[in-house]
Image (cartoon, rainbow, N blue to C red):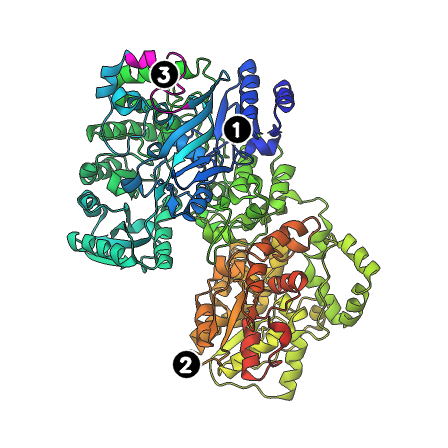
Amino acid sequence: MANLEAELRGAVRGEVGFDVTSRALVTMDASNYRRVPRGVVAPVDADDVAAVLAVCREHGVPVVARGAGTSIAGQATGTGVVLDFTRHMNRLVALDPGARTAVVQPGLVLDRLQEAAAAHGLRFGPDPSTHSRCTLGGMIGNNSCGSHSVAWGTTADSVRELDVVTARGRRLRLGQDWAGAPDGLRELMDGELALLRTGFPELPRRISGYALDALLPERGADVARSFCGSEGTLGVLTEAVVRLVEAPRARALAVLGYADESAAAEAAAGLLPFGPLTVEGMAADLVPSAAALPRGRAWLFVETGGESAGEARARAEAIVRAADVVDALVVTDPAGQRVLWRIREDASGTATRMPDGSEAWPGWEDCAVPPARLGAYLRDFRALLGAHGLRGTPYGHFGDGCIHVRIDFDLLTEPGIARFRRFSEELAELVVAHDGSLSGEHGDGQARAELLPKMYGQEMVGLFERVKGVWDPDDLLNPGMLVRPAPLDADLRFSVLPSEPVDVAFGYPADGGDFSAAVRRCVGVAKCRTASVSGSAVMCPSFRATGAEEHSTRGRARLLHEMLAGEVVTDGWRSTEVRDALDLCLSCKGCRSDCPVEVDMATYKAEFLHHHYEGRRRPAAHHSMGRLPEWLRVVARTRTAALVNALTAVRPLARAAKRLGGIAPEREIPRLATRTFSRWWERRREERAPTGRGDLVVLWPDTFTEHLSPAVGQAAVRVLEAAGLRVALPPTVRLEKPPVGDGRTVALDPLSLLRGRGRVCCGLTYVSTGQLDRARAVMRRTLDLMEPVLETDAPVVVLEPSCAAALRTDVPELLHDDPRAARLAAKVLTFAETLERHAPDWTPPRVDRPVAGQTHCHQHAVLGDAADRRLRQAALLSGELSGGCCGLAGNFGFEKGHYEVSTACAEEQLLPSVRDAPDGSVVLADGFSCRTQLEQLAGVRGRHLAEVLAAALGEGAGNDPEGER
């Protein structure tokens, strides 16, 4: 390996990675398989590709071309050198609107091509659900299709010419009329014309095997077309000329509801004469909430196009009239269509979990049959599942007869794997009996290539092997795929994981307490690798800032997988590679909601840091910021906030403090409040009697509100009381029969308060720095103090979204053995939720202003913002908040070495939304981190929604100009 690495470094200009991280990141794609490569090369051009092939051929090391790594059959993994085209060879070289063609490099993400083509009213026809991250090279290698294939066909239908480098270094330009054919290919095909004309089933989604029938003279002897779907086994693609199609000026989406999936499947073929753009199907099991869909237990998504919205709608309505449906919905609004399409696209990830939460896996992800036989095939398929005691929920491209399904195979035990093989063999026979194709979209890879003789017969499979020999006589390119395949039950990625649960701190309730099962959640669909997000989406800000796989949710999950496997990452919880990859995780929790399988990397990071630093010296930032509540309580007790502010205003002292505390030198240390929120509360209670005769609510004095922004707490009290609610704070000592609700607490144990043990705390800062033993102690103390509140019906109102999220998720998952934790979590409400549920008749003041800012990432991921939207609407606060993450993310943006990524995250959505806001806009930022980021990077004071409403009531600071843009 050392010689191979050295020669590659001397031969190519791109990056060569033989290190642990580089190898671990590409051991898997989105399939059930795992192979450990020797190294990874990111070529910069075709010369680099040729140089890699030359060195690897000399060493007898195989080469695998890889795009986004979203292949579902295992063809994007290998034991030799992996070529990563996403880093450099990812450009749109040219776009010719007149000729309706584009020249692309293999690493170009499909959405980037679509964006460029849309400016000319054009688009690339195929559009897999992974369109935001899949690459053109991967699409050509797998002959991908997508939801619009009934209108625009497969990727092969959109390819004009291909530049490839063969395993022996020849550079060929593939096209029609035998253009670019390697020596011997034409002679081989001329001798097998009868087999080519009779050996391939006719159906729109035949992806399995080599497309050798494209080489028939009556089909133009199209070498480029025949290369599509070859899964990197014939040559390495370096550039492609692809055809674009005219995009409809307007679209309408008809969602048709049916009683079950069989009824939907049988109806699909009958809709094709209407010329739809799509006919997609899915069942209720894949829909978390069917509220946006018409009545039914299964649906067809049928898209139509037209020169105008009226024409598109008329075509959709004609389809509705012709379809025998339970219910139907026609949507012409683009935003409404996006919401519905997102439901369908997320099915590829949602399907990896059964309704009861158990795991389901690919392997038989995309069989295809003639559309007219789809209903009958689905009934037989369901029967076969039942005969093997398996479950799965089909969905997919019903108009093309292509079905996606993930099945609850047991791929962890020998009996389960044996059943997986028996089922696979019988399903292959069933598909062939229906004149179908084992693969209708994602290719054969290792998952199905072994079974190709059942579909094609030995003579055709033998011809495939001879063709492979013509293109790649040394079997250098992606060996084990398509021809002379590896067994379908070998190299399973689960086999290397621990057979017994790993000892961990969090409870992982959704994964049966098994950390390995939690890590297995990542199936590789790579939604976290999108270059941009829309709406309120968050995941994954660190990847968008760096573009590096190790900084994506998937990349980190892969490293954790390899850490548990112990083959590539060999030092377990002490791994520096895993630590470094997790270091730039903002713990934004965006993946908890935006990932289709709800990977929770923030929790995994906290777990890892807990073990990594166990019994070892921690970074200074873990002490300075991880233990922030302790330091701030000391300042409050000694009443030295003014002194601290004065000292940190002296630049040399501030520099020294930041250096000692592991704080980024570019950051300003926030000023402390000279009077805490609790002191304000006590003084106010002494001066005036509690108001309000409504429900009792307990206002949570989180660390940030208490010590850094008490004005937020003060404003919340004023608004809650204006709404008629009775406000109390949590007890400060543990009492047998406490006077909850009178607004006062009784200190029976002064020593407790002197030791700083008299305040509730969610433990967030300890969790985010992986100090989980300390976090548990803090949380248990909090539960002790909150016991009297738990005995009441009072909700716990939390103003800081990150603290509310910690109370709802981190506390019950870390204290999974304490039933009080779940009871407290159930009581937690946001400010807006409290007003909506406990003061439903209250009308907020009319602010009548536009808003700008960002929904807090934890609110988006854990809490939801529906109540906030309704409250803003009632207060006449118009406009939408942006998504993404502010980039400060608690301690993250303050830590040394994180400033650049932190600011990049802020520049993605938050700062532009404020800069572009209309004059007079109110800048909303409910999180202290968000407000701090705005102040330090934009000089703008963001305000909590409570502050805005309090000011409108005339009880706050008035129309504070610092809170306006």
**Image depth: mark 1 or mark 2 in front:** 1
666 left or right of 197 in image = right
Q: Is residue 443 left or right of residue 260?
A: right
Q: Quadrant of the N terminus?
A: top right
Secondary structure under badge 2? loop
Taking the spot 73% from the left edge, 61% from the top edge, the residue there is: 668
Q: Earlier in the sequence, mark 2 or mark 3?
A: 3
Q: Earlier in the sequence, mark 3 or mark 1?
A: 1
Indicate the secondary structure of the residue bearing disc 3: helix
Q: Which residue is mark 3?
A: 467
Amino acid type of disc 1?
A: Leu
Badge number at residue 83: 1
Q: Nearer the viewer, residue 733 or 9?
A: 9
Residue at 64 percent across and 61 percent down: it is 933
Q: Amino acid at mark 3?
A: Val
For this rendering, which residue is in front, 625 or 215? 215
Label ID, residue 841? 2
Image quarter for residue 745?
A: bottom right
Measure the alpha-carbon separation of dots 1 and 2: 62 Å
Mark 2, Cα crowd under 10 Å, few <14 / some 14-19 / many 20+, is few
Where is residue 748, by image quadrant? bottom right
Expressed as whole percent of the image width and height from the top left, the position of residue 308 reads 29, 56
The residues colored magenta run 174-190
Whether 178 is drawn above or below 114: the answer is above
* Residue 528 pos. (x, y %): 49, 46
